[in-house]
Image (tube, grey):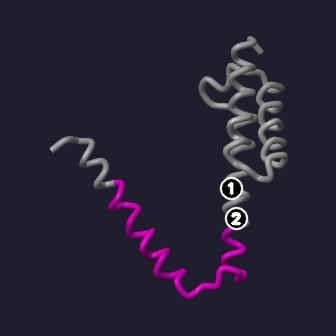
Amino acid sequence: MNWTLYILIAGVAATAIWRFAGVFLSSGLSETGAAIAWVKAVSTALVAGLIARIVIFPPGALADLSTPVRLGAFALGVAMYFLARRHMGLGIATGTGALIAGHLLGF
């Protein structure tokens, strides 16, 4: 058997239990309840912190771009997100395009 298949099976086995437990345990919770609101707030804060860390302390090839370029691309992406009435795809495409333009222009 191929090692890739073993890795796939191990990955699914390690996470499937927790996914099913989450579905089972959350089946009685209200979507507007305090517990779900807390989970949404914590997950949003974690994602925001991760994005901030990547922009300020970039890993890999992103570190080749200057901080003003990274911050500008982030700001452009957020601005487009709101200008396009919260269209995530346009915000991401704009931020990505700004990063590529910064790289091609040598900033």
Evaluate if marks 2 and 1 touch, with contact meaning CB atoms under 8 Å apart: yes
Q: Which residues are magenta?
A: 11-40
Q: Is residue 59 left or right of residue 75?
A: left
Q: Which residue is mark 1?
A: 46
Which residue is the extreme one toward the left? 1
Quadrant (top left/top right/bottom left/bottom right) for the C terminus: top right
The stretch drawn in magenta includes residue 13? yes
Q: Amino acid at mark 2?
A: Val
The disc label shown at residue 14, or none: none
**Placement of 64 over or under 38, stated as above or below:** above
Q: Position of residue 43 (x, y in %)?
A: 66, 61
The local secondary structure at tag 1 comes to: helix
User: Could you classify mark 2 by the number of other residues whose Cα lies within 10 Å: few (under 14), some (14-19), or many (20 or more)?
Assistant: few
Residue 74, image quadrant: top right
**Placement of 72 over or under 44, stated as above or below:** above
Quadrant (top left/top right/bottom left/bottom right) for the N terminus: top left
Q: Position of residue 97 (x, y in %)?
A: 70, 28
Q: Nearer the viewer, residue 89 or 37?
A: 89
Residue that appears at 66% across and 76% down: 36
Q: Amino acid at mark 1?
A: Leu
Q: Position of residue 35 (x, y in %)?
A: 67, 79
Residue that appears at 44% across and 69% down: 18
The dominant secondary structure in magenta is helix
Q: Which residue is mark 2?
A: 42
Q: Position of residue 59 (x, y in %)?
A: 63, 31
The local secondary structure at tag 2 comes to: helix
Q: Nearer the viewer, residue 32 or 48?
A: 32
**Placement of 33 over or under 15, stated as above or below:** below
Residue that appears at 83% across and 37% down: 75
